[in-house]
């Protein structure tokens, strides 16, 4: 049965590559990238072998613990990252639980992340080439370390499915856990500033981590190299107990998940409460705007971006605080607000793809392209514009320079108008493999990943060209302190933003009217 599940994983992978040449190209590029990273790791480990055993042990323990922690966090942040062998698909089959667990475990190594983790873990033996016994132990510990990573990943995935079967809970938890990752740089910098001597701190940290489930298995070869066989044996037992506990938790949670139907109920709403539909006129454009705005707050695929976008400028604030005082922070807030607004408006470049089969309602009810494009642009605009303006005002206050306000406002208005116009064209011309309705916003679906990335890059470059005039004027105005250029940036941003918005909506509407049936077919092909 284990071999059958492994063959099934290979067959599904092969068939998915046959569906799309772009996915094959993406897999090749991903494989080359993973191979390059793996070679760098192995060369670095071999070079590390020239160091003293204390340094080797410190590096491997901390790196191994970080990898193990990553395998614990990533499944929550990116739920459904690799669900080729989704256990829910085997619910109707009487597969013995032990066989299923073993098959899923071995199948997890068939893929770039699992394979790289396994080879790199075993490759830690290369750092102990001057200590043959420790190198032999490192091979065994590397295999067990990789198994710990996979079992921990599967256990946390099964636990999130069984203990929190509500889709909204999983989506919100994934989005919330993504926030610390966004601020990982400032967090690391802050910790670095608070630690005066890493030469003393890191070995002490590694020694502490080595007695925890995260680092126990990675520290065994170092203890063997030092001749501390008692400590090595005790840590090896901790590692085995960790694998056993994780396997038991995985089995228990998976058993419950396979027999407990997931809760799919939505929020209950009282009669007569139309939400955003009360805000807009009873027209086709108003209906589209109200529906899209509802999605922005109730669909996690949209609300994830709505949560992340306002936080992104704060990263630039940290960089500004390192570069200077209030003026640097003000600039970071002002231009960061334009970036946050861009992230919101550019989200509608995949609006029809997110609609999936619900897009059929637009075709069935005869919604024309102008109403569709305008409604979607209005929904994103009422969110992006206040966000960008708020950051521009706050940035000017922090900078203590009123001349900065018209400059950054011009950039924000230009970004919002030009971005909405450009995304209206892209949305009606291109579709992409986005997470399906009901999926996690962090889920990556197989398909045209490379072509989607190229389309997104083309959109970013196009927007950069469209907002270049007001951006240059804003930079010149702020750099020279001449208000004339700042006010010109505001004027150009308003004019060009409005022109590109109208042109983009009309162009997108024309493409929409011609390609509506093709768009429906493209977004519903997997349903």
Image: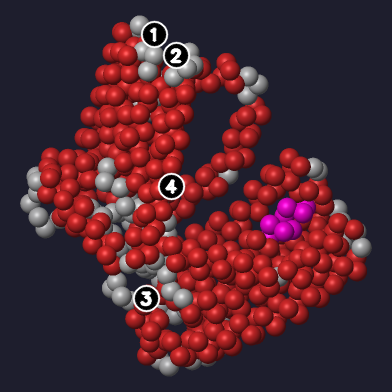
- Label 3 neighbour load within 10 Å: few <14, some 14-19, many 20+: many
Residue 12 shows up from this direction:
yes
Q: Nearer the viewer, residue 295 or 87?
A: 87
Quarter holding the C terminus is bottom left
280 vs 84, left or right, is right
Q: Nearer the viewer, residue 162 or 447?
A: 447
Q: Which residue is mark 4?
A: 33
Q: Which residue is mark 3?
A: 523
Q: Magenta residues, as a range?
A: 330-337
Residue name at image x 61 percent, y 82 percent:
504
Question: Is there a contact, CB below 8 Å, between mark 1 and mark 2?
Answer: yes
101 vs 470, left or right, is left
> What secondary structure do most residues of the magenta stretch adopt?
helix
Residue name at image x 61 percent, y 53 percent:
311
Tag shown at residue 226: 1
Note whether 368 is above or below 272 in the view shown: below
Pick whichever of labels 1 and 3 is earlier in the sequence.
1
Note whether 412 is above or below 375 in the view shown: above
**Magenta highlight on residue 494:** no
Q: Nearer the viewer, mark 1 or mark 3?
A: 1
Question: Is there a contact, CB below 8 Å, between mark 4 and mark 1?
Answer: no
- What is the secondary structure assignment of the residue under circle 2? helix
- What is the secondary structure assignment of the residue under circle 3? helix
Q: Which residue is mark 2?
A: 53
**In terms of image quadrants, where is residue 36?**
top left
- What is the secondary structure assignment of the residue under circle 4? helix
């Amino acid at each position: 049965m284990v071999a059958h599940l492994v063959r099934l994983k290979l067959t599904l992978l092969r068939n998915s590559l046959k569906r799309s040449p772009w996915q094959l190209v993406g897999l090749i590029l991903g494989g080359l990238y993973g191979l390059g990273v793996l070679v760098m790791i192995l060369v670095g480990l071999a070079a590390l072998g020239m160091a003293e055993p204390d340094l080797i042990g410190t590096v491997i323990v901390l790196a191994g613990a970080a990898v193990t922690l990553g395998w614990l966090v990533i499944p929550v942040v990116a739920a459904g990252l690799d669900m080729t062998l989704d256990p829910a698909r085997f619910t109707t089959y009487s597969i013995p639980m032990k066989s299923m667990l073993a098959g899923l475990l071995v199948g997890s190594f068939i893929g770039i992340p699992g394979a790289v983790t396994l080879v790199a873990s075993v490759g830690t033996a290369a750092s102990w080439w001057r200590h043959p016994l420790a190198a032999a132990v490192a091979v065994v510990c590397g295999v067990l370390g990789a198994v710990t990573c996979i079992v921990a990943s599967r256990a946390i995935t099964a636990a999130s499915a069984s203990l929190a079967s509500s889709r909204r809970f999983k989506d919100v938890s994934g989005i919330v856990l993504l926030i610390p990752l966004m601020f990982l740089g400032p967090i690391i910098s802050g910790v670095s500033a608070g630690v005066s001597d890493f030469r003393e701190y890191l070995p002490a940290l590694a020694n502490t981590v080595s007695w925890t489930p995260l680092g126990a298995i990675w520290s065994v070869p170092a203890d063997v190299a030092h001749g501390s066989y008692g400590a090595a044996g005790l840590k090896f037992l901790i590692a085995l107990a960790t694998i056993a506990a994780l396997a038991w938790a995985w089995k228990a949670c998976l058993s419950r998940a396979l027999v407990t139907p997931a809760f799919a109920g939505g929020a209950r709403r009282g009669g007569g409460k139309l939400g955003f539909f009360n805000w807009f006129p009873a027209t086709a454009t108003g209906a589209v705007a109200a529906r899209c705005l509802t999605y922005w707050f109730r669909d996690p695929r949209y609300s994830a971006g709505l949560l992340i976008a306002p936080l992104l400028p704060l990263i630039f604030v940290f960089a500004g605080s390192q570069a200077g005082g209030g003026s640097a922070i003000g600039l970071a807030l002002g231009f960061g607000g334009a970036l946050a607004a861009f992230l919101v408006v550019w989200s509608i470049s995949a609006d029809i793809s997110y609609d999936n089969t619900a897009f059929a309602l637009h075709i069935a009810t005869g919604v024309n392209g102008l109403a569709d494009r305008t409604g979607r642009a209005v929904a994103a605009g009422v969110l992006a514009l206040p966000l960008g303006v708020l950051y521009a005002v706050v940035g000017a206050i922090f900078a203590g320079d009123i001349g900065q306000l018209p400059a950054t406002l011009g950039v924000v208005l230009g970004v919002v108008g030009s971005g909405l116009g450009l995304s209206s064209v892209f949305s009606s011309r291109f579709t992409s493999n986005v997470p399906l309705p009901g999926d996690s916003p962090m889920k990556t679906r197989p398909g045209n990943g490379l072509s989607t990335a190229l389309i997104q890059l083309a959109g970013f470059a196009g927007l950069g060209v469209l907002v270049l005039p007001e951006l240059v004027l804003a930079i010149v105005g702020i750099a020279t302190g001449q208000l004339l250029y700042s006010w010109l940036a505001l004027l150009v941003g308003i004019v060009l933003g409005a022109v590109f918005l109208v042109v983009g909506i009309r162009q997108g509407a024309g493409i929409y009217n011609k390609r509506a049936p093709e768009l429906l077919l493209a977004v519903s092909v997997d349903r």
